[in-house]
Amino acid sequence: MENQRIRISKAMLKSGLLKLLKEKQLNQITVYELCKKAQINRTTFYKYYGNQMDLLNEIEMDFLSQLNEELKPIIAQNENALLPILSHLYEQRDLFCLLVRSIPSHEFAMHLFSIPSICVIFQNMERESGYSETMAKYIRQFVFHGTFSVLYNWLNSEDPEPVAEIAEVLGILKSKL
């Protein structure tokens, strides 16, 4: 367990990186300016992280871990809980879009769809469909990438449609498979 000083330092670094990522790409952010923004010594940064990508990866893992924890009780009640998942992503859309823009989207999509609470929904889809393992593999890839594209475009728009509307769109697409 980390002590309070470590948690505060890491939180300041995460906050600083997120602020800078709103202005520029990760590869344009130096450790020096990150530490200046976070008001943290560079030595402290290097005590916890090797580089800016390590810090971004921890932010991503925190996001996905929190999403998984919040969805566990919802999925336990209803394994097809698309609406609560979309609601959570909508509430966290700024961070979601920032992560998508900063992490190669195929990696972020793979990480998102591999968290247990979301994975359960797609496993149920495969069981219900009766597809062969080969067919299921390709259909799963198609669904993951298509769903991810819909999510990103929806959450990144200036005036996103209501959660229920996107849930309906994804429900229709799922029913067609």
Image (spheres, rainbow, N blue to C red):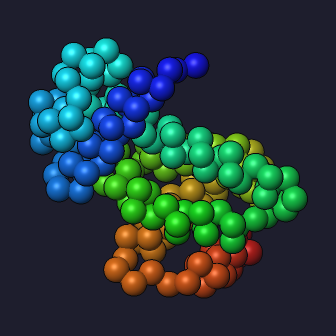
Residue at 31% in and 15% down: 47
The part of the image, by quadrant, that contains residue 143 is bottom right
Pick the residue in front: 65 or 32: 32
Q: Nearer the viewer, residue 156 or 62?
A: 62
In the depicted structure, whether residue 70 falls above or below residue 157:
above
Give above or below for 158 relative to 119: below
Q: Is residue 39 above or below residue 154?
A: above
Identity of the residue drawn at 49% across and 50% down: 109
Residue 10, horizontal then vertical, whole percent: 38, 31
Q: Position of residue 24 (x, y in %)?
A: 16, 52
Residue 27 place in picture, x, y as percent: 17, 39
Farthest front residue in view: 4
**Figure quadrant of the N terminus:** top right
Picture quadrant where residue 173 is located = bottom right
Location of residue 17 in the rendering, given as x and y in whole percent from the top left corner: 27, 42
- In the image, what residue occupies the spot 66% across and 46% down? 68
Give the number of callouts: 0
Residue 32 vs residue 148: left or right?
left
Name the side, left or right, on which 170 lies relative to 151.
right
Quarter occupied by the C terminus: bottom right
Query: For this view, does 20 lie left or right of residue 115?
Result: left
Q: Is residue 40 visible?
A: yes
Residue in the picture at 49% in, 61% down: 92
Residue 127 visible to an observer of this rendering: no
